[in-house]
Image (spheres, grey):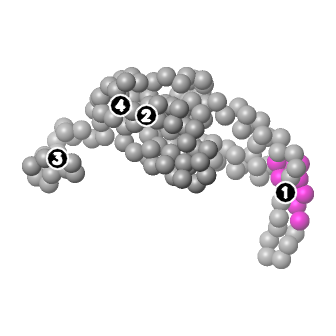
Amino acid sequence: MSFMDSIRTCFSKYVTFQGRAQRSEFWYFVLFLFVGQFVLGMIDSFLFGTVTTIEGGFEAQTNTPVLSGLFGLATLLPAISVAVRRLHDTDRSGWWYWIALIPLIGTIILIVWFASKGTNGPNSYGDDPLGGRGYGGSDDGNYAASSIPRAGDQS
């Protein structure tokens, strides 16, 4: 899934908490949120804030983050929605998102789950968003099969 497809998908499934989201959909949307908040925060600082020159650079701050605040409100539900669908792809309930309330440990656990590979094929939350082909699969076109066993294969 491309960067633009990911953003389009996340906004079209604005409050869809059912189904599954592949890793690229989730991480491209997280990148979009990070870059959007950073850029709009900088614009807020320059438009509505105070810029102070200090030794070796400058410092910008604002008490009225208008643009980044509106962006945050507009993307809050899609961000939660894609996170829940990403948890579904790893065959976990969306309620596990509440683990983020545990300081540091909860966030680390969620990052590991978000970065882990989803289940191959359908699971209890729906069909595989990759169409059951997984990441690479066993048939990669013209490539010869490897003689090196994969991790977890029984010999």
Which of pointers 3 and 2 indicates the residue nearer the eye? 2
Q: Is residue 143 left or right of residue 90?
A: left
State which mark lies toward you, 3 or 4: 3
Looking at the image, which residue is at 36% across and 42% down? Answer: 117
Q: Amino acid at mark 3?
A: Asp
Question: CA–CA distance between discs 3 and 2?
Answer: 24 Å
Q: Which residue is mark 2?
A: 92
Rendered view: 140 above or below 43: above
Which label belongs to residue 61? Answer: 1
- Measuring from the top left, give residue 62's x and y in whole percent: 86, 52
Crowding near the residue tagged with mark 2, few <14, some 14–19, many ≥20 C-alpha atoms within 10 Å: some
Q: What's the residue at 19%, 37% (across, down)?
A: 139
User: Mark 3 highlights which residue?
Assistant: 153
Nearer-N-terminus badge (3/2):
2
Q: Position of residue 54 (x, y in %)?
A: 85, 72
Tell me: 112 left or right of 34: left
Report the span colored magenta: 44-52
Q: Does label 3 or label 4 sit earlier along the sequence?
A: 4
Query: Quadrant location of residue 129?
Result: top left
Q: Position of residue 115 (x, y in %)?
A: 44, 46
Q: Earlier in the sequence, mark 3 or mark 1?
A: 1
